[in-house]
Amino acid sequence: MIVYRLLVSLFALFALPAALRRGGVALLRARLGGGGAPTPGPHLWWHGASNGELASARPVLDALLQARRDLHVVLTANSATGLDLARGWALERVTVRPAPLDPAWVTRRFIRRWGVIAHVTLESELWPNRVRLCPGPVIVLGARMTERTARGWARLPRLAADLTGRLDFVSAQDAASAERLSALGLPPAARGPVADLKALYMPPQPMIPQALKDAFPRAQTWLAASTHDGEEAIVLDAHEAARATDPALRLILAPRHAARGDAVEALITARGFSVARRSRDPAPGNADVYLADTMGEMPLWYALAGRVFVGGTLVARGGHTPYEPAAFGAALLHGPDVTNFAAPFARLKGIAISVHDARSLAAGLSALAPPERQRDAGQRAADALRAETGVDGLVREIVNRLPPVS
């Protein structure tokens, strides 16, 4: 524990000046466990790193709030995007705060301030002092323990055993993570069913402006979702090749990071395509490519596209989620690097189309051109990724462990 105290103190030395620069005194105070106006009474502390984790677990949180109408929640996130997402939900009995750092005195301050009675943390967010100091049960949903992370914890066996030994319920996102946590010291009684939170994703029904409906007939539209540098050039080459046999084909290009919008626009125009940008053009008009350079609108693009290329898979990024486009019924295409989502992509073998360059991507798009092929592939993908452990089962496990609110 001494080593961890040193490491977390060093981390705080770097994190606090960054918090002051980004959010001023208010964010600095929050990172130190203060600020805000706590509602009276005890709280469940719900924590996720960012918007992806929080969005995946939203169905569980909603069901828990219905099951325990006496429960108040303080929800924390590390990132600004996660905080914005959670605040946008405007959930009753939920207060959203920046996550405190993990020095013991900060954690104690936060727990006292909010009257924390239990802690639910998502995926890989295991902070030793939160686990050690929480006065009630600690629950981990969608726990993720990679081989590399497990090796790191194994170098600190006493800390790892103390951490995992204090967990009351863990639902790992895959069997391999469950085994690694058990090897580090997770008690058998705390090991719950495997449940990947991303498989619980419930697609929203976005309001689609008529101008976008007219511009993007679903069967004629494909989306390159969450692309990275190096992928956009391949996407554009594939689009040009596919349009040779399907001139009506429409492309929505959504970079993973909206801040890259200028660079991606320059690439599009350099390739000879006309381009409209969502950030300045509410509709694409006659543009060849619609550049989706805004935050928080991915459900809109998924709803418009009958075919979706999953970004981060043609470069060494490990790939992004197939769950969300599959939930919208899209036919999926992806590159070879699916490290981050190996298990779901394994279930998609023979359903999603694997590509490795512009030529194979264009061929995949053409193979999925018939609307009935898109519908069939989309339905099969949704069926393959449907969660084995549902929301109700996870909520029962949480409710059974929560103390009464007095």
Image: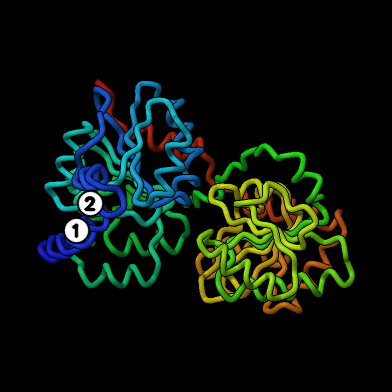
Task: Measure the alpha-carbon separation of dots 2 and 1.
Answer: 7 Å
For badge 2, the amino acid type reads Leu
Residue 9 at x, y percent in the picture: 14, 60
Quarter occupied by residue 86: top left
The quarter of the image holding the N terminus is bottom left
How many labels were placed on the picture?
2
Instruction: Residue at 23% x, 33% y: name it.
Output: 114
- Horizontal side of 332 relative to 152 (left or right) equals right
Q: Nearer the viewer, residue 213 or 8?
A: 213
Instruction: Residue at 62% x, 53% y: name it.
Output: 385
Colour style of the rendered protein structure: rainbow
Question: Is the residue marked by circle 1 packed among few (<14), some (14-19), or many (20+) residues within 10 Å?
Answer: some
Q: Nearer the viewer, residue 399 or 60?
A: 60
The quarter of the image holding the C terminus is top left
Residue 5 at x, y percent in the picture: 13, 60
Instruction: Residue at 32% x, 35% y: name it.
Output: 74
Residue position marked by numbered label 1 in the rendering: 12
Quarter occupied by residue 402: top left
SS at badge 1: helix
For badge 1, the amino acid type reads Ala
- Horizontal side of 392 relative to 305 (left or right) equals left
SS at badge 2: loop
Q: Nearer the viewer, residue 49 or 245?
A: 245
Going from N to C along the chain, the mark reached first, 2 or 1, is 1
Asked if labels 1 and 2 touch by Cβ distance under 8 angstroms, the answer is yes
Instruction: Residue at 37% x, 57% y: name it.
Output: 124
Above or below, 393 relative to 330: above
Above or below, 13 relative to 206: below
Residue position marked by numbered label 2 in the rendering: 101
Residue 30 at x, y percent in the picture: 24, 43
